[in-house]
Image (cartoon, grey):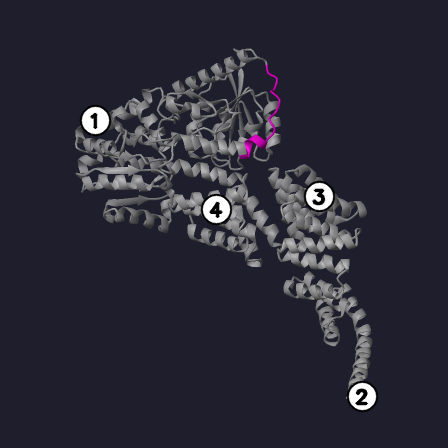
Amino acid sequence: MASNVGSRAFQNARLQKKHRKQVDELLPRAVAAYRAGRPAEAQAICGQILALLPEHFDALHLLGVVALDSGQLDMAEQALTKAVEAEPRHAEALSNLGLALFNRKRYEEARKCQELAVALKPNLVVALTGLGNTLMRLGRPEEAIVAHDRAIALKPDYVDAYCNRGMALLPLNRNAEANQNFDRALSLNPRHMEAMFGKGLASIILRHFDDALAAFDAALAIRPRAAQVLAQRGRLHQQAGRFDPAMADFQAALSIDPRQEVALLGFAQLSVIRDNVAPAMDACRKVLEQNPASEVAWTWLGECFAKQGDLTTALQHFERALELKPDFGDAITAKIFLLDFMPETDFVQHQAVRREWWSRIGAQIARRPPPLRDRDPERRLTIGYVSADFRTHSAALVFLPVLRHHDHQAFKVACYSCSPLQDVMTAQCRAAADLWVDAWQMSDEELADRIEADGVDILVDLSGHSAGNRLPVFARKPAPVQVTAWGSGTGTGLPTMDYFFADPVTVPEAVRPLFAEHVYDLPAVITTDPLQGWQPTSLPMLRNGYVTFGVFNRIDKISEPALALWSRLMAALPDARIVIKNGALQDPLLRDGLVARFVAHGIAQDRITCLGLSTRDQHIAQFAAIDMSLDPFPQNGGVSTWESLQAGVPVVAKLGRGAAGRAAAGIIKAVGLHDWVAEDDDGYIAIALAHAGRPADLAKLRTELPSMVASSAAGNVETYTRRVEEGYRLFWRRYCASG
C-alpha cells in the first residue's frame, strides 16, 4: 500500500513539473498577446494554463485583467478573487479586484480591496486613484481628492488622476477648479475621452452650454458609442430646449446600454414634458430597480403621479427624494408646485415649503456685501428684470405690458434673459428694454457679477419657483432692492427678497406675516394687454337654448374637488355643456382620462367637449362659444381669467386658502365683478345657476365687460404700470432712508 502511495506521489510530482514547464512556455505568450491587443487570444491561453494549474496566480491575475478590460465582470471578479486567495498580499491583484467590484457598483467591497492594496504598496498610483473614484461613489468627495492628490504627487504626469480629481470636484461645486484638472489631463493627452467628458459636465454646471456641447462632441468623436456621453449631450440639448435632438441622444445611449441611468432619466423627463406619462414611469422604475437611492428617479416618478392627478403619491415620492438628498432643488421645487395644487393646503404650508427651499439651498449661498449705489431717492433708477420667459409663454403675457409702458425718463430697464429660446415675443421684450443681456449661459455667480456691474438698483424676479428661475442669484443679493413679481405670484420664501407684488384679495392682510417678503399691493396680482381686434360676440345661450361653460386652463389645474363641483353644477342644469381646452388634451390617454372622470360623476360624455392645441388667436376665438367660464381650484387661472373677461365672458371663482387659489378672485373683483366670487362650494354653484337663469342680464354683461376691464386700474396696462413704478420709487426711497 505504502509503495502505491509513493508511486502516485512521484507520478503527480512529475506531472506537476511537466505542467509547470508547459505553463512557463504559455504564460509569456499570453502576456504578449494581451500587450499586442489580442485579448481573446490572451484569454484562451490563460484558460489553457488554468486547465493545467487551476491555482496559478499569474494566469488568474492576467485572465482577470483581460476580462476586466473587455467588460466581462463576472469572469473578472471570479478570476481576481481566486488570484487574491492565491496571493493575499499582492497589491496589484487587490487593486484590480477593487476595480472589478467598483464596476459592479459594490463600492464598499471595492474600497476595502483598494485600501489594502495601498497599505501594502503606498506608491501604487493606480490603486490610489481607483480608491479616489470609489470614495466619490460612496459620497466622500473630499477624501477622494486626497487620494487623487497622493497619486499625482507620486506621478505628476498621471492623466487619469487629474481627470478623476476633476470628477471629484464636481459634486463639491468647485467647477472652475475641476475644469483646470480636465484641461491638465487634456494637455497631457488631447484624446483623453473621459477628461473631455468631464469638461462637458463642468461646463453644464457653469451653464456654459456651447462649451459643453463642443466638449461632448469632441468626446464622441473619440468614442462614438460612449453611452454616458450621448446621455449627457441629450441632457444638454434638453436644457437648451432642443427636445428632438435630446430624445435622439437618449435613445441612442439606451440602444447601447439599456440601463444607462442619465439617459433613462432624461427620457423620463422629456416624456413627462410631452405628456407621455406611461413610458416616463417605466423609465423611472428601471432606474430605481438598479439604483433605489436615485433622488432624480423618485422626483420624476412623483411628477408622473402628479400628472395623473395622484397628488398624495407624488408628494410621498418628492419627500423620499429629499430624504436621500435634502438639498435636491428639483424635489423641493416640485413639492412647492404640488402643494399649491393640493386642496387641503393653505398659506401656512405654502410659505413653510418656500422657507424650506431657503434653509436647504438659499441659506448655503454666500450673500454679497451690499453694492455701493448713489442714494439719491429721486434719481433715474435701473430696474433689472430676470426671467427665462422672455418668449411666447403665459408669464410674458403678464410682464410684457409693464415693460412696454415704463417711463424711461425715470427708469432704465434692463432685461436678463435666461433662456436660449427666442421668438417674436422675445423681440418685443428686447425692444422694450434699454439694456438686453443674454444670460442663459452665465453661471449664477457670473450673472450676479453682471447685475452688480450694470448698476441695477432694483432687481425683479419674474419666475418665483417656476421653471427656469434664477433664485440662487437673488440669494446672493447683487442689488440693493429685490422684488418678486408676476411670473408666479405666490412669494419665494427668500429673506433676500424685499418685496412681493400682490393685491389685497390674493394675499389678505391676516396672512402677510407668513411671507418672507413685504407684500406691496397692485390693483391685481397680474395684468395683461387687451385683446387685439376682438369683436363682441352674442351670447351662445340665446341661440343654443342651453348654457355652455368653459374651462380654458391647464388640465393639471382640474382638481378632483373642482371637477366634482362642476359635475354638481352640470347635474343641476341637465342641458348644460362644458368645453375644456388645453394643449395636453391632444394626448388621447389624458383626454379619455379626463372625460372618464366626468362620466364617473354621472355626466354623459356627449356633454363634454375637449379641445387641444391651437394658435392664440384661435384660442381666444373659442370664447365666442362660451357663456360663462369656470375657474379651477385650488390652483386658479391667471392669464386665462383675463382672456375670458376681455372676451366678455365672466368667470365664476371661489376664494381659496392660498395665493394661487385666490388670484382669479383678485382679478375678477378688480374689474368690478364682486358678485361672481364665492366664499364656498355652495356659493359657487349658486352664482352659476343664478346667471344661467338670467340670460338677458348675461348678454348685457357680455357686451359691457370688455370696457369694464379696459377702464379698471387692473386692466388698463398704462395705469397698472404707473402703480408698479410708484412701488419702485417707494422701495428706493425707503432704501435711501435706511442708510
Using the numbered discs, state the Cα–Cα distance from disc 3 to disc 1 in whole angstroms.
74 Å
N-term-proximal mark, 1 vs 4: 4
Q: Which residues are magenta?
A: 360-373
Q: Which residue is mark 1?
A: 700
Q: Which residue is mark 4?
A: 300
Q: Residue at x 41, y 30 (%)?
A: 348
Using the numbered discs, state the Cα–Cα distance from disc 2 to disc 4 in whole angstroms.
76 Å
- Give coordinates of residue 396: x percent, y percent: 44, 31
Q: Which mark is residue 145?
A: 3
Nearer the observer: mark 2 or 1; the answer is: 2
Q: Which residue is mark 2?
A: 3
Are the two marked residues, 3 and 1, in contact with CB atoms closer than 8 angstroms? Answer: no
Q: Quadrant of residue 49?
A: bottom right
- Give coordinates of residue 516: x percent, y percent: 48, 25
Q: Residue at x 39, y 26 (%)?
A: 526
Is 180 within the magenta?
Answer: no
N-term-proximal mark, 3 vs 2: 2
**Image-based side of 325 in relation to 341, left or right:** right
